[in-house]
């Protein structure tokens, strides 16, 4: 489950309540709670980031380079999720 700061506030609580009767809001709440683990967008042609390209075979090499760079930056900044990223993303995706 994914969680970010705005989910602790009154707005998200109101969204959860509204989601009980509004399917569109229910879908939005589900997106906030259960995001995909990776996202990759072409922000020039898709500035609203609506089409996730993470599984596009044509971009496989580029995605791999970005994963490696992210891993290096996480290590350099002593990110507490580095090992989890390596295990769940790098190792899983290299199989």
Image (cartoon, grey):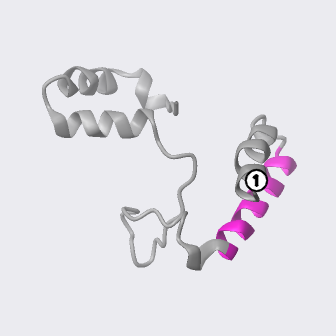
Q: Residue 47's x, y, as percent?
A: 39, 69
Q: Residue 90's x, y, as percent?
A: 76, 53
Relative to residue 41, is residue 18 drawn left or right?
Answer: left
* Quadrant assignment, res 7: top left
Asked if 22 appears above or below 65 in the picture, the reply is above
Q: Is residue 76 magenta?
A: yes
Callout 1: few (<14), some (14-19), or many (20+) C-alpha neighbours within 10 Å? some
**Residue located 49% across and 30% down the image:** 5
Q: Residue 11's x, y, as percent?
A: 30, 27
Q: Number of callouts in the render?
A: 1
**Residue located 75% across and 57% down the image:** 95
Magenta span: predominant SS is helix
Relative to residue 36, is residue 9 drawn left or right?
Answer: left
Span of residues in magenta: 61-77
**Residue located 59% across and 76% down the image:** 59
Asked if 49 appears above or below 29 in the picture, the reply is below
Which element type, helix, strand or loop, lies under badge 1? helix
Asked if 78 appears above or below 38 in the picture, the reply is above
- Identify the residue under disc 1: 90
Q: Is residue 88 magenta?
A: no
**Residue located 28% across and 23% down the image:** 16
Relative to residue 63, is residue 8 drawn left or right?
Answer: left
* Quadrant assignment, res 40: bottom right
């Amino acid at each position: 489950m994914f969680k970010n700061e705005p989910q602790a506030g009154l707005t998200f609580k109101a969204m959860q309540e509204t989601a009980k009767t509004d399917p569109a809001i229910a879908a939005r709440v589900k997106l906030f709670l259960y995001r995909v683990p990776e996202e990759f967008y072409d922000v020039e042609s898709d500035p609203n980031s609506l089409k996730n390209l993470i599984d596009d075979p044509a971009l496989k090499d580029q995605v791999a380079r970005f994963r490696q760079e992210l891993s290096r930056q996480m290590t350099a900044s002593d990110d507490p999720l580095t090992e989890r990223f390596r295990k769940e993303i790098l190792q899983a995706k290299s199989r």
